Amino acid sequence: MRFALFLALAHIRRRPLQSGLALLGVGVGVAVLLLALSLTNGFVDGLVRATLKAYPHLVLFSLTPELPPLPPHPEAVAQAPFAATKALLTRPAEPGRGPGVDFATLVGLGEGGEALYPELGLKLEPGGIYLGSALLQSLGALPGDRIYALSALQERVELRVLGSFRTGNYLIDSAYAFVDLKSVEALAGLKAQGYQVRLQDPWRAKEVGAEMAGTRFYPQAWQDTQRTLLEQLALQKRVLGILVYLIVAVAALGVANLLVLKVVEKTPEIALLRAMGASRATVGLVFALEGVLLGLGGVLLGNGLGYLLGLYLAQRPLDLPGELYFLTHLPVKMEGRDFLLVSAASLGAVLLSSLLPLLRALRVQPGVVLR
């Protein structure tokens, strides 16, 4: 083993430029892949956080005509009765301003509703409404304006604009508004449909919902209502990872090319070693160790570069055009699992690419070469 390792290191040092370029190719490929995955993680995490600014972690729909009391749970930090309905919002024309009209989902919150969405700064009052920022712009409304909500039952309710909120998710900012529960009851004839619950850990919404529901409620976690979005984001990460992994595969082929050249160059030396009593396993181990050393060096270099690039972009996040994306800045989220998977997959690619030169070295016949 020591003899094989000594020869492998000697071969690598013999051609420092080629060895360095092969190692650098693997390192850059690994770093780019890690950075791409970290940016994707940041985008997914930022989009989820933006969505949950104005979206309930857990909804418990009542299965009885009368709303039963909600059982306590240690992970529930806020809860409130709610009712939601679709409505047509209109703003009458004023001197210098034309009328405004748009559809929206009105979410009526009962006592304690402000605590469900602490980042929005809601201060609900009877007859007041908070509009999403894009919805406010679509209606051309200003705080203090009077607008009218028209339901499918042809009921009309006058509301006063108390303010607006911005989550960063355009789908919510353009289609949601918050009012008090009595306004929705008057508009759509609805009683409280259940409870909205805010949790310490939103990712445990399904488990907590099952524990709180019992036989009186039907639980609906945010992962269920946003399942399409989460599946699309997961698919995007997988596709991006596969595409960028091709860079690592190309770098692995560069390592294979270097090892093939070494086998061709060292054919007389291989034959001499075999004639002196070295076994096929020893010869094969030399070139296998070269592949391992180049692969490990490239993976370690790539991990270091990927981590440093991730730290830099975390301090200076990329700007995104707000009219095209949900987020104005692209955050970075580095996960240890990604580093482990990328390292293992990259090292595996390099080792697989080393099989061809390894087999070629094993097929060298010392008698033919030395003759």
Image: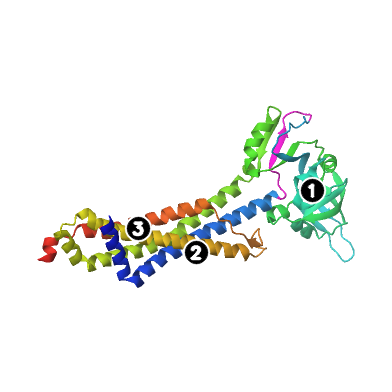
Q: Which residues are magenta?
A: 53-66
Q: What amino acid is labelled 3 in the image? A: Val
Q: Which mark is residue 178?
A: 1
Q: Determine whether, in the image, residue 243 is placed left or right of residue 279.
A: right
At x 68%, y 27%, the residue is 215
Quadrant into which the N terminus falls = bottom left
Residue for badge 3: 292
> Most extreme residue toward the top, as rendered?
215
Majority secondary structure in the magenta region: loop
User: Is residue 64 rendered magenta in the image?
Assistant: yes
Q: What amino acid is labelled 2 in the image? A: Leu
User: Is residue 29 rendered magenta in the image?
Assistant: no
Q: Quadrant of residue 146?
A: bottom right
Q: Quadrant of residue 41?
A: bottom right
Q: Determine whether, in the image, residue 295 is placed left or right of residue 326.
A: left
Is 225 placed above or below 121 here?
above
Which is closer to the viewer, label 1 or label 2? 2
Q: Position of residue 61 (x, y in %)?
A: 72, 35
Callout 1: few (<14), some (14-19), or many (20+) C-alpha neighbours within 10 Å?
Answer: many
Residue for badge 2: 305
